[in-house]
Image (tube, grey):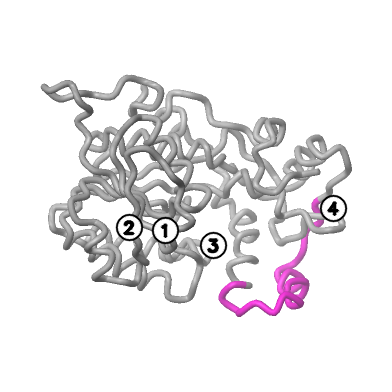
Amino acid sequence: MVLGWVGAEMPANAEGTASVGLIAVTGASGRLGGRVARRLAAAGVAQRLVVRDPARAPSLPAASVLRASFDESDNARAALAGVTTLLMVSAAETPDRVQQHQTFVDAAAAAGVEHLVYISFYGATPTCTFTLGRDHAATEQYIRDAGAGMRFTFLRDNLYADFMTALVGSDDVIRGPAGNGQVAPVAQDDIADAAAAILLNPLPHADRTFSLTGPEALTLDEVAAVISEAAGRRIVYRPETVDEAYASRASYGAPRWQVDAWVSTYTAIAAGELATVTSDVPELTGHPATSLADLLRQGRSAYPAD
């Protein structure tokens, strides 16, 4: 069953125009938000790009651009005035990200946004292994509690397939405490297709949570093999202990919370929390989910394997 309208004629009102209110997209200058904005532009709907730096926003037909950061309550409320449906791409990873999200959600509710689509993380719970997943769980709960009649949809994305090649070190080794656990990485283009489908026809998806994955679960040994095939050279996975993982990342000089996030990406895989494959991508988009091998074969990785 196809739940969205990507690749299909959009519903129309009595005047024959698309029955979609004003859509706002955050993060439109980034990889995921930009993909969604381009899909909405192709569908011919009006949208508002809410960005921190208007100079970096894409130039798209029927798109206006307003500046606001998540932590700027007044600016955010003004930027969202008149918006019916909002795509909220989560903020950059910082210690106060949840507080930024809460400020923005409050602004959306105050502005009268009717439906908020939030980009979350696969398996987000207050106690999930991946530390940043807990931020997403807290944000989801805040959105549920926001009231003001605002509907919501949560898109819980597995690890991005586009970034799997970034796990490879300069010595062609993937290192981390993932053991023999599996991950079901999802392509950003598939996420964008799913998000656009919901934004163009939000009501059937109200107050629902979707878990977006690729079509298969892979161990990091298998990820290394797929990348090896694409790159034409041997990539290997070498498991680390948790202590070894912290030690091997100490040279980056990153704050503890960030190193915790890096390491817990792997321990979440080891715990089996990223392994279950869902059918949500094909059900929302009408096309199969993209495998890591196909994504790399098509040259769509954010970090080319070669």
Q: x, y (%) of residue 230?
A: 78, 36
Disc number lying in front (3 or 1): 1
Q: Residue 172: give its label.
A: 4
Q: In which quarter of the image is residue 19?
A: top left
Q: Residue 66: give its label.
A: 2
Give the amino acid type for the residue marked by disc 2 in the picture.
Answer: Leu
- Few, some or many C-alpha atoms within 10 Å of disc 3 (few <14, some 14-19, many ≥20)? many
Separation of disc 4 and disc 3 at Cα? 25 Å
Residue that badge 1 annotates = 54
Residue 251 painted magenta = yes
Disc number lying in front (4 or 3): 4
Circle 1/circle 2 CB separation < 8 Å = yes
| Mark 3 or mark 1, earlier in chain | 1
Disc number lying in front (2 or 3): 2
Give the amino acid type for the residue marked by disc 4 in the picture.
Answer: Asp
Circle 2 sits in a helix, a strand or a loop, which is it? Answer: strand
Quadrant containing the C terminus is top right
Separation of disc 1 and disc 2 at Cα? 7 Å
Q: Residue 130: give its label.
A: 3
| Mark 2 or mark 4, earlier in chain | 2
Q: In this view, does 95 lie to the left or right of 248?
A: left
Give the amino acid type for the residue marked by disc 3 in the picture.
Answer: Phe
| Mark 4 or mark 3, earlier in chain | 3
